[in-house]
Image (tube, rainbow, N blue to C red):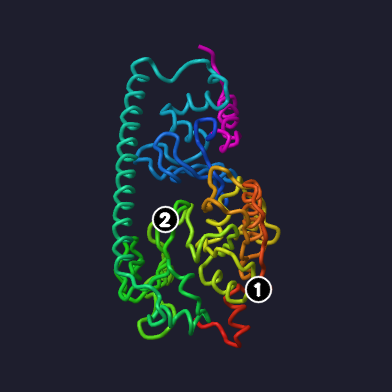
Amino acid sequence: MARASRAEWENWIALARTRDIHDVAVEYGAHLKRDGHEWIGPCPICGGRDRFAVNQQKRIFNCRGSGEGTYGAGDAINLVMHVVGCDFIEAVERITGTPRPDRTRDENADERKKREHRHQALAAEYARREADERAALEAKAARDEASIADIIKRAKPLDGTTHADRYMRETRGLDPPRHLTGDLRFVQNLDYWGAGDNGSNEPVLLANTPALIAIIRDALGDVIGISQTYLDPNEPRKWKPTGSPRNSPKKIRGRKQGGMIRLGRPAETIAIAEGWENALAWWALGLGPEEVMLAAAVDLGNLSGRATGQIAHKKLVDPEGRPRRMPNGLPDPKAPGLILPQGIKSVIIIVDTDSESYATAGLLSVAVRRFYAQELNVELSFPPTGIDFNRYLLRELGREEQP
């Protein structure tokens, strides 16, 4: 057996730790996407959707699905131990591509067999957890579908007399014709589940209020979700949630990905805003062609779809002084965002200019390039700088935006 000095061992291990941990993760089966300072995705060994995270700058990874006593976090060596189920020495050998300095193994045949048996048992436990998570997601989707169907069944059309109509007129300055509001409805009482003020992650029932709901449909017209705007029971304004500051008067039930809120009849030209309020305000201002279908994507990310990666922000930095990340402007074909109905030939993107400009421009670039790739004509319609079209409409009406 060859002897090896302490320095040889340390240099060998240090060589493994200098490998790019993202490259190591990809080499061992990880499919990751950029999310801020990290790369996230399913764990190569225990699955999930975004439980596996790699931080290139800190050279560490973490798997939220790993059990106690496992190597579910740490450096590149720990990552290989986690994915492969090997010991420390074998992980370094795999990463460096060279044998240990003394050319021996730490395990005999019996020890290796026991270790492989432990890893197989751990992999089986991960598979069980993955099946449980999948079943839980499917059960939630079924509950959401039933809940959405019940809410739509209870909802009333906007006929000019509901509390939602009053909110639209008095707060939003909107009085659209009925043919534009077929998928906007009013619910007299809708439960609001949100975060309490006790720090618990479990949602609690905070209120039961009136709500304006907007139906989200996929490209075939099937209902996949609803956008819920909770209203103050007495005043024509949004309800102010209690409990945690994270609670918002707007919530999505079901899915928005791939879908949109349809406003009006199908046409060859579609004008898409982030929210239905801005789409209707844009129409009320008399912008765009006479024959146009209005739609709302719910948010800019769903309108644009995902980018292939991120680049450094030109101005903003994180608390450590590093540039924040923003979309690189190139559409990821695997994550297209909303999918347009058949027959669309032209797209008008109704832009908000009250968001951070560089990141917004990155997402708009993704959207424009995605629609161009579909051989569609694309235009962008901008309000004055610093506002959206609903605020622009209120200014034109000589009114101030209400909270």
Image-quadrant location for residue 223: bottom left
Residue 76 seen by the camera = yes
Q: Is residue 142 magenta?
A: no
Q: In this figure, which residue is indicated by the disc labeled 1?
A: 386
- Give the magenta part as a residue range: 1-24
Q: Is residue 387 left or right of residue 253?
A: right
Image-quadrant location for residue 317: bottom right
Q: Is residue 285 above or below residue 9?
A: below
* Amino acid type of the residue that numbered disc 1 sits on in the rendered structure: Gly
Q: Nearer the viewer, residue 224 or 6?
A: 224
Q: Is residue 43 left or right of residue 11?
A: left
Residue 348 pos. (x, y %): 63, 61
* Amino acid type of the residue that numbered disc 2 sits on in the rendered structure: Arg
N-terminal label among 1 and 2 = 2
- Tag in front: 1 or 2: 2
Number of marks drawn? 2
Query: Which labelled disc corresponds to residue 255?
Result: 2
Q: Is residue 246 left or right of residue 335?
A: left
Q: What secondary structure predominates along the stretch shown in magenta? A: helix
The crowd level at tag 1 (other Cα within 10 Å; few <14, some 14-19, many 20+) is: few
Q: Is residue 91 above or below residue 288?
A: above
| Disc 1/disc 2 C-alpha distance (Å) | 30 Å
Task: Give the residue drawn at x 49%, y 32%.
Answer: 29
Residue 70 pos. (x, y %): 38, 37
Residue 326 seen by the camera = no
